[in-house]
Image: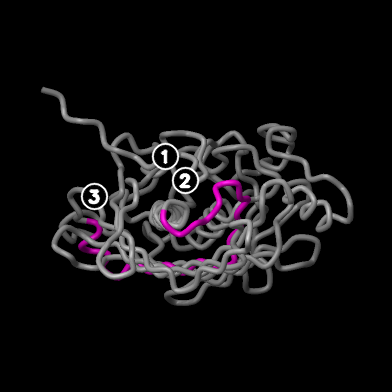
Amino acid sequence: MTAAAPVRVARDLVHRASEQEILVSPPRRGTGSGYAGTTVTAGLSPYYRDHPGPYWLDALLLVEACRQAALSAAHEYEGLSRDIAFFFNSIDLEITDAGALADLDGELTLHTEFDELRLRADGAPKRIACTQWAGDRAGRSLVRTRMVVQGVPKGRYGELRAYQRDGSAAPTTAALGPDDGRRAGLVAPRTVARTRPANVAIARIRDEDGAVSAALAPDFSNASLFDHDYDHYPAMVLIEAGRQLALARRAEHAPHTVTAVTATFEHFAELDRPARLVARHGEHRVDVECVQDGLVVTRMSFGTAPVRTRKGAA
């Protein structure tokens, strides 16, 4: 008798086009005022396995699963309209027990609490702030996150973007094609904890004034980074590029992974303008800025640690 297929949340509740990119179960009411769910990693996209160490030690996987858990709960239970274009204000994630997470056998449990949920009359979010934790079946908390998002009705999104671009329409990933020259000088995958060039998001890395910089250069045809047609670089792509630059120098000495991410998104990162990331490495954290047209569009900070394999081996 074959096992039942895992139940994933509906795609429109998490704003994803591909079933393979759905990472969570349908939300349900938890104890108190929160919402519960689990991750669903059966048939997980190969993108999330393309790094050294257990796939659970992937900050992007964890951020995306928590994002999906929060949005689906807000849509399903809190009156959030489904006809919304979302954008992130900030994300803060910390892996609180990397050893237990590396050894996890099964799925993570997810718990979401909305600290603030301000909706307009049309159901569009002025501001949604939530705190989450993810743990194992024994109830241990292994990951914590806090994120803040806002959005506009999809019918007003084009107007907003044209205003930001002084009246010009924003080109999309489909119109620009998979490679318009941005990916010339792509860094070697092994230097940024990847194995496949399609998953490398930075190019032309160089040292400058005590910092390390690289061009933002993701592959627009990468279905995990660009699940549907975008007219800007989404938050997850900026985090991935920042993570790769944060690991670029660490990986020269030993395989490292990211154990914490803090990011604020101050402006849209435009697809049709060059952007560079600049990283300054500390002992345990790496601060990264994404700069476009002389303006810092995103500020990020990454905690890093040597890769942990199963059962505590280094």
Which sits earlier in the primary sequence, circle 1 or circle 3?
Answer: 1
Gap in Å between the C-alphas at discs 2 and 3?
20 Å
Q: Nearer the viewer, residue 304 or 81?
A: 81
Would you identify the image quadrant in which residue 290 lies? bottom right
In the image, the segment drawn in magenta is: 77-102
Residue 113 is drawn in which quadrant? bottom left
For residue 23, above or below residue 293: above
Mark 1 vs mark 3, CA separation in Å: 19 Å
Q: How many other residues sit within 10 Å of disc 3, few (<14), some (14-19) or many (≥20)?
A: some
Q: 303 or 39, which lies in front?
A: 39
Name the residue at 65% across, 61% down: 277
Residue identifier under label 3? 107
Give me the C-alpha separation between circle 1 and circle 2: 6 Å
* Tag nearer the camera, 1 or 3: 1
Q: Are marks 1 and 2 in contact (CB under 8 Å)?
A: yes
> What's the coloring here?
one colour
| Residue 309 on image: x %, y % | 24, 55
Q: Which mark is residue 13?
A: 2
Residue extending furthest toward the left: 1
Q: Classify 10 Å Cα crowding around label 2: few (below 14), some (14-19), many (20 and above).
A: some
Q: Residue at x 26, y 54 (%)?
A: 108
Left or right for 114, reference 280: left
- The residue pinned by badge 1 equals 10
